[in-house]
Amino acid sequence: MIVGKRKPLAEIARMLEPFKKICILGCATCAAVCLSGGEKETAETASLLSLLWQKEGKEGEITTHTLLRQCEYEYIDEFAKALPDCDVFLSLACGVGVQAMTTRLPDKIFLPGLNTTFLGYPLEQGVWAENCLACGNCILHLTMGICPITRCAKSMLNGPCGGSQNGKCEVRQDVDCAWHLIYERLSKMGELARMEAIQPPQDWSASHHGGPRTIVREDLRLETGE
């Protein structure tokens, strides 16, 4: 899932300072699952902002609405049929959602209420770990499901490096060395010989290093008759 954390309330208040009629938009998918932008968090943000406005003597109106997904036009179009009367929308979706809303409703202002951080998964309640950089060239089949691009601080394809000590990364001692984990995993699965294969340099053109990416599935595209 895409994981993010709500911006500090003071930063949100500064962004919204010129506006008096605010609609806070929640997202019921990734943002809800990571407890940063679902219906509950949307209501909480509205309440906190309202209290702050009262303390500062600012007058205004704050409403809330939660879309199933802010990243798909289908749900944005449904929302657009009854747009709230407001000056600005504070989106608690990821950056993709904010941009999708802006693209689909270009006459409206959408501001980000989250700091989108990474693709990850939950380790436990309230704890998420980054495990994918969306590099566009997955090699998990070579490493039996452990990503060195993300989990190695140097994104090494042939590791470990000389800084690894006792299974830990030289960057921080509380971070496992990705290549130590890969070694243990390959050993357990009887595939340790894979460590002897030298991997070529990563093709970073498939990642964001090659510029904004677009995926086209011709088999899924609708016929336009053109």
Image: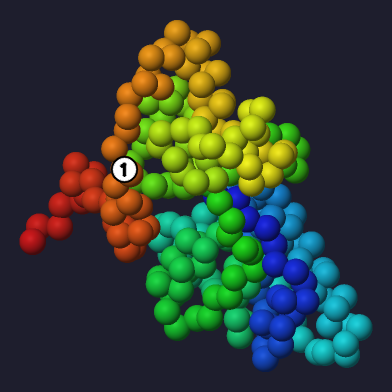
Q: Where on the picture, by quarter, is residue 77?
A: bottom left
Does residue 189 sit above or below 103 in this rendering? above
* Residue drawn 64% across the image and 46% down it: 171
For disc 1, the marked residue is 201
Residue 46, percent from left and from top:
76, 69
* Residue drawn 91% across the image and 83% down it: 55
Q: How many marks do you count on the picture?
A: 1
Residue 205, percent from left and from top:
28, 54
Q: Nearer the viewer, residue 28 or 30?
A: 30
Specify whether residue 121 is in view.
no
Q: Nearer the viewer, residue 135 or 32?
A: 135
Does residue 82 sit above or below 32 in this rendering? below
* Residue drawn 82% across the image and 76% down it: 50
* Residue drawn 29% across the image and 47% down it: 203
Looking at the picture, which amino acid does disc 1 mark?
Pro
Q: Is residue 81 left or right of residue 210?
A: right
Which element type, helix, strand or loop, lies under badge 1?
Answer: loop
Q: Residues within 10 Å of mark 1 (few under 14, many from 20)?
A: few
Does residue 140 sit above or below 196 in this rendering? below
Residue 89, percent from left and from top:
60, 75
Residue 16, percent from left and from top:
68, 83
Q: Where on the picture, by quarter, is residue 40?
A: bottom right
Quadrant including the C terminus: bottom left
Most extreme residue toward the top is: 190
